[in-house]
Image: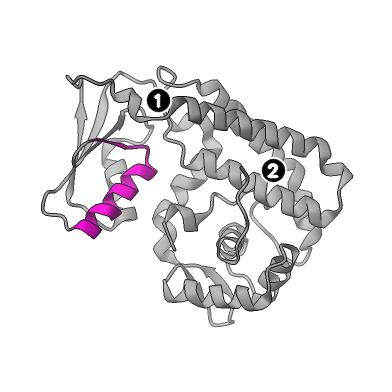
Amino acid sequence: MPHSVTAKSLILDLLRTSKPSALPVRLLVDTAAIFEISENALRVNLNRLIKRDAIAQDSRGYYQVSETTSPLRNWVSGWRDGEKRIRPWNSQWLSLQLSSALKAKAGEQLQRAAYRFGFRQFWDSCWIRPDNLRVNSRELRLLISQLSGKDDFLLTEVAHFECQHDPAELWPITSLEQEYQAQTNRLNTSLENLETVDLATKFRESFILGGDCIHTLAIDPLLPPEMINTDLRDNLTELMHRYDRVCRPFWQELFSHYKFSHSPAHLEPQLNQLLAIS
């Protein structure tokens, strides 16, 4: 189901897609009004996000995403590359082993980061994923370390797991495939109806549906075709590119005085969800 837009998610999504990256509060307030979010709610959340170092304010009073959220940016934006993000799978696995010396909170941060990169918990402090990502293990280790702020873990290549259960069962394959198809259906329906609604409705719809699609693609575990129907994922990626091309003029028309790197559909994806800001 499409997500609901909150003051917090709206702020982060807009700042993430803006070009230049800093925006005045008036634009944020005007956009919030389209979603019936009050100015007071928006300003309260701006202050909260600043205190949590999720966003920053420059010398002009403009707001932008904080550099502390940057480790995941390139990875998240990589959804555009679709299946180029993976390579042929040689049936080997990556194993991430957490240090036993990690405290509970640090362990949770590291596990959350591992999850974002498609790892799933295999046994106690051991998390695994297929070794099919285009980035090599050294680059992946750096990304996980940057996102979690921790480096107390081992990342190793494993040829085979001798166990009672199939490791592939750690991922909800059917649910993932159903979500690809559901997102595809929603985008196609939206494309069919966009010309029949007013500009504000076009903005709201493309903002929400496009954002949900990007969220799905950006945090996808990127399983290989031996485990999942990658054609469904590839079709969704191509459709999202088309959806962006169609929706971008609506975005530009609504905010003609500002430039954005992408249409509102490109929320890439809710950074507050990815970084577990609560």
In which image quadrant can residue 28 be found? bottom right
Q: Look at the image and say whether residue 119 sits in the magenta stretch.
A: yes
**Front residue of 141 and 176:** 176
Instruction: Indicate left or right for 95 with 5 as reference.
Output: left
Q: Amino acid at mark 2?
A: Asp
Residue 114 pos. (x, y %): 31, 44
Tally the numbered discs: 2
Location of the C terminus by quadrant is bottom left
Location of the N terminus by quadrant is top right
Residue 3 pos. (x, y %): 60, 50
User: Is residue 119 in view?
Assistant: yes
The overriding secondary structure of the stretch rendered in magenta is helix
User: Is residue 263 in view?
Assistant: no
Instruction: Indicate left or right for 9 with 163 as reference.
Output: right
In which image quadrant can residue 10 be found? bottom right
Q: Amino acid at mark 1?
A: Arg
Q: Which residue carries the number 1 mark?
A: 87
- Secondary structure at badge 2 equals helix
First to last magenta residue range: 104-122
Residue at 57% x, 24% y is: 232
In this rendering, is residue 262 above or below 25?
above
CA separation in Å, label 2 and label 1: 26 Å
